[in-house]
Image (spheres, rainbow, N blue to C red):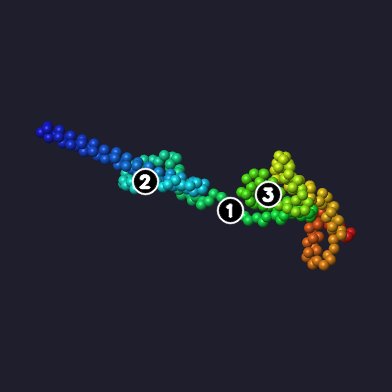
Amino acid sequence: MSQESGTSSTSLNLETQLADAMTVIQTLMANVGNLTQQVVHLMQNVAYMQAAQNVPQPSPQPSPRHFPLPPSPQQQPLLHPSLFALAQDQSTPIPSSSRIKEPKIANPLPFSGKRDDTESFINGCCLYMNGQKSEFPDEDAKIYWILSYMQTGSAKTWRDYVVALMYKGQQLFLTSDELQKEIDQKFSDTDKRTTQLLKIRTIQQRDRSVDEHVQEFEKAALEAGYKGYPLVVVRATT
């Protein structure tokens, strides 16, 4: 009788150990399944980052998804915090390109050194350089680009002088702002307010339309700094 009881007890212990072993195996397989999913997420993130940086992707490796995933046990192991955050990032769409599309900006007109065109030339250069920043990696690129548009007249003569000094190693301008200030001093009207005030007093319509005449008058008034009643007084004295 005692022998049968011992045999039954041994069998029960073996069944218990076998059940515990099966539980451990299921837990290990669940861990393998979770790690497989995390590896897939990591590979996807690497592919997204390489595509955003225009880096050639490595040859595809066999996907770990062919491993059979066991049924989920009642107690799932927790993900590592960094892997959990990485998995959460999958819900955020990744842009197809990291470069922001810049607006189309017109190039400045070639500059001849004419006094009346100086301000428009400087403004055109500023518009293009600020609107197309990706085309200018440094200040030297901006300086060379501005000089390239000084193509005729006195502007070309002065540009050739500056370039000749640059070839000799004399860097006259460290920034594009310094170059533009020098262009303004060399070619623009040094007393624009007086010039425009004289223009207000002597402006005539001649064969132009009324709209053209008014526009030229308003431009001269704006550059002269007159508005309101002072402008009426100045206009009345013409």
Of marks 1 and 3, which one's residue comes earlier in the chain?
1
Judging by the rendered image, the residue that carries numbered circle 1 is: 101
| Residue drawn at 37 percent across, 44 percent down | 36
* Label 3 Cα neighbours within 10 Å, binned few <14 / some 14-19 / many ≥20: some
Relative to the observer, which residue lies in front, 1 or 100?
A: 100
Task: Evaluate if marks 2 and 3 touch, with contact meaning CB atoms under 8 Å apart.
Answer: no
Depth check, mark 2 against mark 3: the one in front is 3
The amino acid pointed to by label 2 is Pro
Residue 77 left/right relative to 222:
left
Residue type, label 3:
Trp
- Residue lying at the far right in this picture: please name it: 237
Q: Quadrant of the N terminus?
A: top left
Residue 117 seen in render:
yes
Query: Dot 2 surroundings within 10 Å: few (below 14), some, or many (20 or more)?
Result: few
Asked if residue 166 lies left or right of residue 32, the reply is right
Quadrant holding the C terminus: bottom right
In this orientation, which residue lies closer to the viewer: 133 or 75? 133
The residue to which callout 3 is attached is: 145
* Discs 1/3, front: 3
The type of residue carrying mark 1 is: Lys
Percent coordinates x, y for residue 45 in the rendering: 46, 46
Point out which mark residue 64 bears: 2
Q: Are marks 1 and 3 in contact (CB under 8 Å)?
A: no
User: At which x and y percent is residue 172?
Assistant: 73, 41
- The residue at the point 79 percent across, 67 percent down is 209
SS under mark 2: helix
**Residue 97 spot, x, y in % from top left:** 53, 51
In the image, residue 7 lies at what x, y percent?
14, 34
